[in-house]
Amino acid sequence: MSNYNTSREPMTMEEFIATATSKGWTLAPKHPGQNVFEINLVDAQGRRIVAYIQPTIHKDHIGFVGSVYGLVEVWEEDTIEQKILEGQDLDEDTTGAEAVEAYDAALAYYDPEPDGADEVRRGLSENAGQQRPTYLMEVDARWGLWTPSAAEKAHFTASRETVEWLCSRRDGEPDQGLAKAFDGLAQKALEVHAEAAEPPLTTAETDMARSIAMFDLEGWTDHDHAEDWMAAGGRKGARDVIAEYEK
């Protein structure tokens, strides 16, 4: 399985391509079915780099599928620095001091230091390594089953931040009515987040879900109605109805 690395320096895709071409790499055509957000580069030795824009908590970086052959410095997959930049959860045994040290190492590639850095340090110092709620662990388990694109990673990260913000407002709200309202919003945000974590449906799952949709629509064979039914439920909804049907 390929590893996913992140450039240490923030940069645009145009800046990365300029750096690559200046060192002898050239753009190459996409492969059939390749993600539209990825680009390919090859060198004279036939080596290939697959790159994409990687959003982070500060600026865009470049993400890579596999090796970059020393073209640029990278934070390797699952390092603390990469996890912090991409807004991922840290391991439960990560201390606040370790998290802040890693964050400062990541910021060494920023000039000037980005706005909000002190707030990030404070949050890491206070919250690093805290155990994730069970419902987020379940979402993360689904997220770990597949290889998302850069856009899918960005959506997952943004929806996680929304859930955590709403939960923090709910937990810190003394007014029970407002706390209940925040809880309702948090539940809806969690549904969006859980859907963002779901792997794409297989062909067999899609066909099965579509057949169930036809059945639920009382034999209605209108293709558009079945597609609307599936779109409303999403990947998670499709798998839920398949599991219910197979009981």
Image (spheres, rainbow, N blue to C red):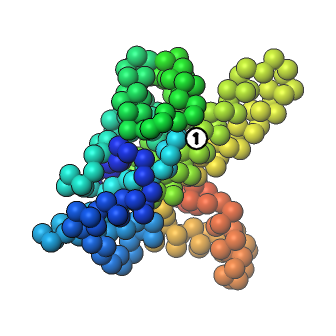
**Which quadrant is home to the C terminus?**
bottom right
Given the current orientation, which residue lies at the most extreme bottom position?
222
The residue at the point 67 percent across, 26 percent down is: 168
Can you tell which quarter of the image residue 216 is in? bottom right
What is the secondary structure assignment of the residue under circle 1?
A: helix
The residue at the point 65 percent across, 60 percent down is: 233
Residue 31 in view in this figure: no
Residue 231 in view in this figure: yes
Left/right of residue 154 with respect to residue 20 in the rendered view: right
User: In front: 197, or 65?
Assistant: 65
Residue 239, position in %: x, y? Answer: 54, 57
Given the current orientation, which residue lies at the most extreme left position?
45
The residue tagged 1 is: 160
Residue 155, position in %: x, y? Answer: 56, 52
Residue 9, position in %: x, y? Answer: 38, 45
Q: Is residue 241 above or below residue 176?
A: below
Left/right of residue 73 with respect to residue 160 in the rendered view: left
User: In front: 25, or 2?
Assistant: 25
Q: Is residue 113 above or below residue 131?
A: below
Residue 83, position in %: x, y? Answer: 41, 37
The residue at the point 31 percent across, 60 percent down is: 19
- Given the image, on which type of amino acid does mark 1 rest? Arg
